[in-house]
Image (tube, grey):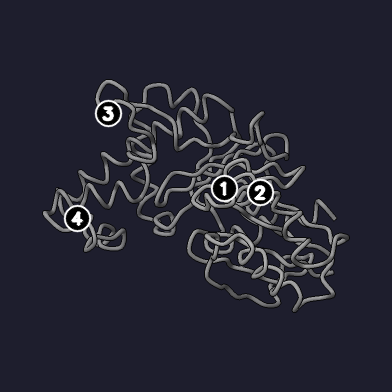
Amino acid sequence: MNYLCFDVGGTFVKYAVLTDHAEFIEKGKYPTHSEVPDQFFADMATVAKRFPEIAGVGISFPGFVDPATGVAKRAGALGQLDGFNLIAHFKQALGNADLPVAIDNDAKCAALAELLNGNAMDVRNFAVLTLGTGVGCGIVLDGKVLHGGHFRAGEFGMSITDFQAQGYATLHDMAATSSLVRAFAKAKGLPFEQASGEMIMADLQDPVTNKVVRTWAQHVAVAIFNLVATIDPERILIGGGISKNPKILPFIEAALNENPFWGEFHTDLALCKHDNDAGLLGALYIALQNH
């Protein structure tokens, strides 16, 4: 059987048709028109109508989403969709109330992608920490994704970890890839727009750059340690654009080893297998479970 999966982002909506063995048959993307909700759902329906033989639909979506009802309690960057029942509106636009549709938060879908056919297939308790524009987190305990009482479980980027020095600055501000790039640009006297993660990785031999990365890695290590102390996972997986570079993991491991308690709480650390397709594969996982 084949499934249609959507990965909704602030700029583009990616979609793919996949088999129940996670094989891609077709991929595509189109601009996100969330500012006009009717257009947003019409665009999804237009794609779905191209594939009348699909067995179900999976949707990876930002924000606080109730997977049981399909309601977006908070639609992340797509604020115009706050409070919408995304499943109901999609089915209405499609004109098919019987099609099985499943939805969940994008970070949770990224974690489920690793459970489906990634680097968490052999564990039941793990977390995915994504380092990008912000810090995302998906937590899986006993093989089930953790949603929480208000569907906010895993909003780890909002953690405040350095109050005396940084006030209410969150991990989004200190441990995201964007914060690393910003610190690098400041240290090098560059405009933020001219700096990039690739530039940083190519300049690691420079003492200034090396210090910037080590400082950033300490913030990431604090996040990892607190997560480990809270949920006791079997593995922590690091995702996000910068994680694709194998040079970054040793910096994080070195920062963790500076923590005198890490020996007692030491947990397996690895990189995510999936990157750009994580949302689509996570959407497939929930579609398979729903069907």
Q: Are the two marked residues, 4 and 2, in contact with CB atoms closer than 8 angstroms?
A: no
**Residue at the extreme left of the image, as rendered:** 189
Question: Mark 1 or mark 3, which has the lower sequence index?
Answer: 1
Residue 220 in which image quadrant: top left
- Please tell me in which quadrant of the rendered image residue 47 appears: bottom right
Which is closer to the viewer, label 4 or label 3? 3
Q: Is residue 249 above or below residue 257?
A: below
**Placement of 237 over or under 200, stated as above or below:** above
Residue beneath disc 4: 205
Secondary element under disc 4, as helix, strand or loop, is loop
Label 4 neighbourhood size at 10 Å, few (<14), some (14-19), many (20+)? few
Residue beneath label 1, please? 75
Mark 2, residue position: 84
Of tags 1 and 3, which is closer to the observer?
A: 1
Circles 2 and 1: CB atoms closer than 8 Å: yes
Pick the front one: 57 or 31:
31
Name the residue carrying label 3.
166
